[in-house]
Amino acid sequence: MMENNIHFSSKNHEWETPLSFFAALNEKFNFTLDVCALPENAKCDKYFTPEEDGLIQRWEGVCWTNPPYGREIKKWMRKAETESRNHGATVVCLVPARTDTAWWHDIALKGDIEFIRGRLKFGNSKNSAPFPSAIVIFGKENLKEPS
């Protein structure tokens, strides 16, 4: 199980989704599943913990993910795109706007992207994140064809 914990390394209070930011998105999307959470920071009643490993679960309905921001992000973004394409899930991802990375060009650009103005303050942090963020939305109706 310890290996799964690396998938959730950014899912601590330091990188927890700001509640007011999530609430505004939830009002628009009505999320049913948080695919990458801990019990203390889950944003939906239904969520996958590190022990359940969201990367091996089927994602259904309207899914929220604030995936780990390290090297594992590519796996989470690919899973989001795949679950949307193959199972009809709508997946909304809060990610760093790393437009110079392979995962951004290979995966994120297949969804709809909304750049976030300014920098988010995650969790109880007094300071803003040292990077810009974006929302990437994968939905059956908006997916671009693989390149």
Image (cartoon, rainbow, N blue to C red):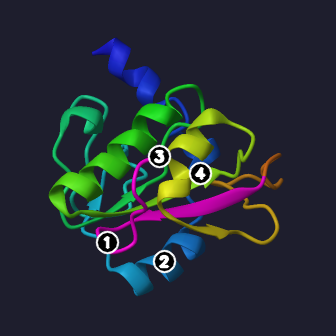
Q: Residue furthest bottom?
A: 27
* Magenta segment: 132-147
Residue 50's place in the image compared with 79, above or below, is: above
Image x and y of residue 40, in percent: 39, 49
Q: Is residue 50 magenta?
A: no
Q: Give the alpha-carbon distance from disc 4 to disc 1, as whole Å.
A: 17 Å
Q: Earlier in the sequence, mark 3 or mark 1?
A: 1
Mark 4 in CB contact with mark 2 (< 8 angstroms): no
Q: Quadrant of residue 29?
A: bottom left
Residue behind mark 1 = 31
| Other residues around mark 4 within 10 Å, as few (<14) / some (14–19) / many (≥20) | many
Determine which of the numbered discs, if any, sits on residue 95 in the image.
Answer: 4
Give the number of the mark in front: 4 or 3. Answer: 3
Residue 8's place in the image compared with 123, above or below, is: above
Residue 39 at least partly seen: no
Give the number of the mark in front: 3 or 1. Answer: 3
Identity of the amino acid at label 3? Answer: Ser
Q: Give the alpha-carbon distance from disc 2 to disc 3, as whole Å.
A: 29 Å
Q: Earlier in the sequence, mark 1 or mark 2?
A: 2
Identity of the amino acid at label 4? Answer: Val
Give the number of the mark in front: 4 or 2. Answer: 4
Mark 1 in CB contact with mark 2 (< 8 angstroms): yes
Residue behind mark 3 = 147
Residue behind mark 2 = 25
Image x and y of residue 48, in percent: 25, 44
**SS class, disc 1:** loop
| Other residues around mark 1 within 10 Å, as few (<14) / some (14–19) / many (≥20) | many
**SS class, disc 2:** helix
Residue 104 at least partly seen: yes
**SS class, disc 4:** strand
